[in-house]
Amino acid sequence: MSYVAPLKDMLFVINELAGLSEVNALPGCEDASPETVEAVLEENAKYCSEVVGELNVAGDKEPSFWKDGTVTTTKGFRDAYKAFAEAGWQGVQHPVEFGGQGLPKLVATPCIEMLNSANLSFALCPLLTDGAIEALLTAGSDEQKRIYLGNLVSGKWTGTMNLTEPQAGSDLALVRTRAVPQGNGTYKVFGTKIFITYGEHDMAENIVHLVLARTPDAPEGVKGISLFVVPKFLVNEDGSLGERNDVHCVSIEHKLGIKASPTAVLQFGDHGGAIGTLVGEENRGLEYMFIMMNAARFAVGMQGVGVAERAYQKAVQYARDRVQSRDLAGSSGPVAIIHHPDVRRMLMSMRAQTEAARALAYVTAAAYDAAHHHADDAARKANQAFYEYMVPIVKGWSTELSIDVTSTGVQVHGGMGFIEETGAAQYYRDARILPIYEGTTAIQANDLVGRKTARDGGATAKGILAQVRRTEEELSAYASGDLAVIRNQLAAASKSLEEVVDFVVAHSRSDIKGVFAGSVTYLKMAGIVLGGWQMARAALVAERKIKAGEGDARFYAAKIATARFFADYFLTQAPGLRTAIVEGSAGVLALAEDQF
Amino acid sequence: MSYVAPLKDMLFVINELAGLSEVNALPGCEDASPETVEAVLEENAKYCSEVVGELNVAGDKEPSFWKDGTVTTTKGFRDAYKAFAEAGWQGVQHPVEFGGQGLPKLVATPCIEMLNSANLSFALCPLLTDGAIEALLTAGSDEQKRIYLGNLVSGKWTGTMNLTEPQAGSDLALVRTRAVPQGNGTYKVFGTKIFITYGEHDMAENIVHLVLARTPDAPEGVKGISLFVVPKFLVNEDGSLGERNDVHCVSIEHKLGIKASPTAVLQFGDHGGAIGTLVGEENRGLEYMFIMMNAARFAVGMQGVGVAERAYQKAVQYARDRVQSRDLAGSSGPVAIIHHPDVRRMLMSMRAQTEAARALAYVTAAAYDAAHHHADDAARKANQAFYEYMVPIVKGWSTELSIDVTSTGVQVHGGMGFIEETGAAQYYRDARILPIYEGTTAIQANDLVGRKTARDGGATAKGILAQVRRTEEELSAYASGDLAVIRNQLAAASKSLEEVVDFVVAHSRSDIKGVFAGSVTYLKMAGIVLGGWQMARAALVAERKIKAGEGDARFYAAKIATARFFADYFLTQAPGLRTAIVEGSAGVLALAEDQF
């Protein structure tokens, strides 16, 4: 079935929770008026549904394939990508100076969600290009910017991130790829990179590889890693394409999912050396890569939201169509299964998790915009801290829940869900990579514990919890009904989260293993509590709208019901998770290696 | 990698938790001495590891295929099945009278677990044959028993269950297949059955289909369904094979997992009518099918345990081999990832869930044996009630957790987990069918709520909770340490479960939809609490053994640590689940169909 962008839900979050009007008021964001944003999203939705979304099944059935060093993408992908580039979608969030639209991240984010709902495999190519653009904007020389940025922002060329090597996955200290200076400002790069998404393909004229490598005198470990730009085709002074560079795709992987996205093994320098130029300064590669990774991690979080939304839509459709068993309250014959309480529960669970993850991500995007554009220095800093705290949560939590949501989507389909032809299984397979790439959930959780919580003594986390408490106070105005229930669950959950933050801060040095034993659970819990906070905010807005007689009352009533479901089914998990984190490390760490 | 049967763990559960000595003391179970049981399991383990386990990857890569009405199974399956039959493994739990070994279910259950760990696809064939044997033992005529049982118990022939039709999945009231009496004691069967596991294959001489169908004058709905036996080849008076019957496999499904197991569409009667005989009485088919389904549901629960164990073993192996990043507490270089706390957490989560599900299942198997063999009528009844209460939990909970466990298994492998060649992804795909077939988790939960909890006013559930409380009392002897923590978590969890039972009993009539909205959550919670109860019992045994200086102290210490982990990470979920069940139906049921 076709993907239908949930524009009404998206605009609700953009306007009411993420505060588009505040973003629109920021210096440099004047173009992002509510009218413009709505028009951009509608146009993007059309492209995603009608063009890319229709290629999703084809990409799974007839994946991209490798032959003699070249990769042919799924039929239709080239044209779809051409249309993507021509419409300017690659440039939505990038500077006008390099041909982009210069729109806020709050606008780019729903566009990224829609592209991923439509086709996770396809969307990965622009996602990686965004990362390359980000890295070059941050650390590239004027010359590099001149040569590459325009063509990347226009989508004429695409970008890649080359980090992983067979022995260096999560641990980049183990990177062995070498970069030897040639004395003319260029380097020759030698090594093998694996798991390179869109490392080779036929959709664009050139591929701009950003590559982590070591120079000859570099120190060991992560402090000796530099970043290089190594194009597939060398670029002449006038910008035209020159010789083929010495980087070659020797194979692509046979994967569980996202099969249309070619995952390349790239061989650099087997025929004399791949010519590259240094980005920024030597030995600061990891630092630059982190900037680009923050953007990429956030975007992978949106992949989680995107595939969850798509799986939800498919499950709802099936539940409406499939007739089976009578209504529990009595019916003259069998009814559509959407009437059965457990099917309701499954759909609500899919819906509530997707909405919570979306809301948290959009709010985080708005913080990014304020961090970059706010006139006030303190506001910029506060928003930057908020953004950085949220990135590992948006990445880790949204992707982990996408596995649950897509799995539930299969379950809604019953036996048909297990048949590949039905299509629900593809989402389940596709989603499985999301908590792994761009940093596994454990890597995100390490970031959350170390850099984002312990480093500032929990100040950012406590600041966010203070905001949660303000929402709880607003909810206190309601003595009964859904909002009162939501308030109680949120208050218990946020209290538990606060205790966890205190625990992390207090023990991250004295009992480092004990704290990290609970790191992923802390990430999950933070996602639930802060996602539940956004759902509570949504319920408050909805309640006020209904009371004021504004807008679509049934739409707002559904927001309240979904927030209520999230509170009862997810926020209630927080106290148990707290215990697992605070008391559970004994069990986690008790066994010796040979006792497993 | 090869499967290694966890015999030590299995024997611990069999002896210490399920009480083999009590089972061995039952009339008719005298052969099941500890020595015999150990010998049987060792022999079975050898066969499973060396023969069937080695075909697991092949079955995924080169699935069984259909051509011109015949199905060719994966290369090696025929020989492996021949060896299975010749060794007498099909007959482990079946009556000596028909050539079986007549061993208790407590002995057959670990055998079934091992076969499923080794190869889920392969194991399905004997699983369905067991179901057919069960149905014929229960309701077959002497003639049917004479013709079929010997050949089924010996594994010479295999059996199937034909329930599902395109319009009749969970809802068997919608079955349309017709059976027309021929006046000579036989019937002609006409109709289409789908999702028939091993409905056609090349591993045995004959296939015995048990088919639900309606006779011409049958009432509508489930009260008009009869059960027929329809063999692939008709059987002559002397037991030799006769003509090919009019049942034909018109296609098999292309599935997400268990690809070596052919899932057939069977066409009955397209060429004049498939000849069958009635099993038992007309219109009582569903009743007989339920007997066979209870056995099959329990066995599918064991499939969940089996695939979880296999995924765990693979993850442990990878975590020991893969070297990446330094130890958090400091190390001279990168270490095997099993040293990292979050990898520990993942492995412990896989291990603890698998052990809990295994323990609950084996204890349930022992209750089955007591229900069938105990000399005392009241003891038989009590054990039967225990068994029946547990079956939907063993089926529903073990299979749902197998998805979590196999998913975590992929995660432990990082990027390699997403590459099909690694093998971890197969378990993730294979497991996904388990909560669907033989009754979805919702169907199990309906059974648990309706027939198993509400019908007797919660008496059975409360009786089991009283047993849990006795374990809590035993744990109270320990004022501190792991056992004290386990006691506290178990007590809070069992209290929550008791409140849920009260809620279900009190409202199953007055608010049927509200109760069923929480049915799957109740099932999950019952699994956690009762699985946690078994883990607590294991910890008590282990503690006593250590204190007494008996046996392998490190093995017992691991039992305590795993129980502790289960308590902190799973039992702690119970209070939150209670709230979701008792208060959550408002959110589940709030939306109208068009609000989704």
Image: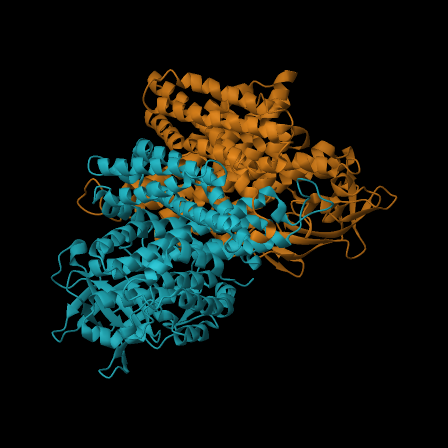
Chain colours: A cyan, B orange
Say above or below: B148 vs B417. Answer: above
Q: Quadrant of the N terminus of chain A?
A: bottom right
Residue A299 percent coordinates (x, y):
36, 59
Q: Nearer the viewer, residue A130 or A179?
A: A130
The residue lying at 17 percent from left, 54 percent from top is A221
Any part of residue B101 in sight: no
Left or right: B354, with B295 as reference point: left
Q: Residue furthest front?
A: A548
- Nearer the observer, A242 or B276: A242
Residue B94 drawn at (x, y percent):
63, 32
Q: How many marks?
A: 0
Lateral position of residue B595 relative to residue A572, left or right:
right
Residue B438 lies, in percent from the top left, at 61, 42
- Front residue of A187/A578: it is A578
Q: Residue at x 13, y 60 (%)?
A: A218
Q: Which quadrant would the C terminus of chain A be assigned to in this image?
A: top left
Residue B307: image location, x then y, percent: 48, 42
- Whether residue B215 is visible, yes or no, is yes
Q: Is residue B88 above or below residue A142?
A: above
Left or right position of B399 against A104: right
Choose top left, top right, bottom left or bottom right for residue B155: top right
Write down the quadrant of residue A274 in the picture. Answer: bottom left
